[in-house]
Amino acid sequence: MNEDLKNKIFIFKNEGMSYSNIAQKTGLSINTIKSLFRRQNSKDGKKYTSCKNCGKELNISSNSRIKKFCLDVCRFKWWNKNTDGNRKCVKVLICKNCRRKFKSYDNKARQYCCHKCYIIHRFKNNKECFS
């Protein structure tokens, strides 16, 4: 796609045309038009978004993933603030070694409550877990 066509597409969008109307006028697919706008967030080829937690502007290079948070601290704060403690994927499991119940928020079903129980059960040490 050449620059003239890109400029025409941006002009059409500024005039209020929909993606489907622009696609009909230019002969391109709707998905091509949408992806052009998705990739073209700024003129210098960088994407500028803001942190979902603190609102700080993020500068992301064009070849990197889209970031939603400026720091891990912001990500943790946002997560804790917006989950309301109701995590749907939490499973209550029973440890194979000590038979205690534990909660796991994990895609894979864990079998042990801690690493120490894993070692004890795996290597058949007859020691109790005190974690």
Image (spheres, rainbow, N blue to C red):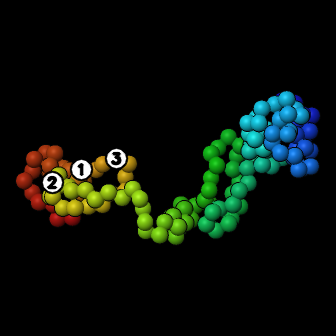
Give the percent coordinates (x, y) of residue 70.
62, 60
Who is closer to the viewer here, 18 or 10? 18
The disc, 1 or 2, on the residue closer to the chain's N-terminal end is 2
Nearer to us in this view, 120 or 83 = 83
Residue at 86% from the left image edge and 39% from the top image edge: 22
Mark 1 near mark 2, Cβ–Cβ under 8 Å?
no
Q: Is residue 116 visible?
A: no
Query: Alpha-carbon neighbours of circle 2 within 10 Å: few (<14), some, or many (≥20)?
Result: many
**Can residue 92 be seen in the rendering of this structure?**
yes
Q: Quadrant of the N terminus?
A: top right
- Res. 11 mark: none
Q: Residue at x 14, y 49 (%)?
A: 121
- On the rendered image, what quadrant is the C terminus found in? bottom left
Q: Which residue is mark 3?
A: 108
Crowd band around label 3 with a 10 angstrom C-alpha radius: few (<14), some (14–19), many (20+):
few
The percent position of residue 87, horizontal first and vertical second, equals 42, 62
In this picture, residue 93 sits left or right of residue 90: left
- Name the residue: 64% across, 68% down: 54
Q: Horizontally, is 2 left or right of 73 in the view? A: right
Residue 91 position within the rendered picture, expressed as x and y whole percent measured from the top left: 32, 57
Position of residue 67 relative to residue 52, above or below, is: above
Q: Element type at marker 2? A: loop
Residue 80 locus on image (x, y percent): 49, 68
Could you say whether the residue bearing mark 3 is in a helix, strand or loop? loop
Q: Nearer the viewer, mark 3 or mark 2?
A: 3
Quickly name the residue at label 1. Answer: 111
Q: On the image, which quarter does residue 4 sit in?
A: top right
Total labels: the figure holds 3
Alpha-carbon span between mark 1 and mark 2: 9 Å
- Mark 3 belongs to which amino acid? Lys
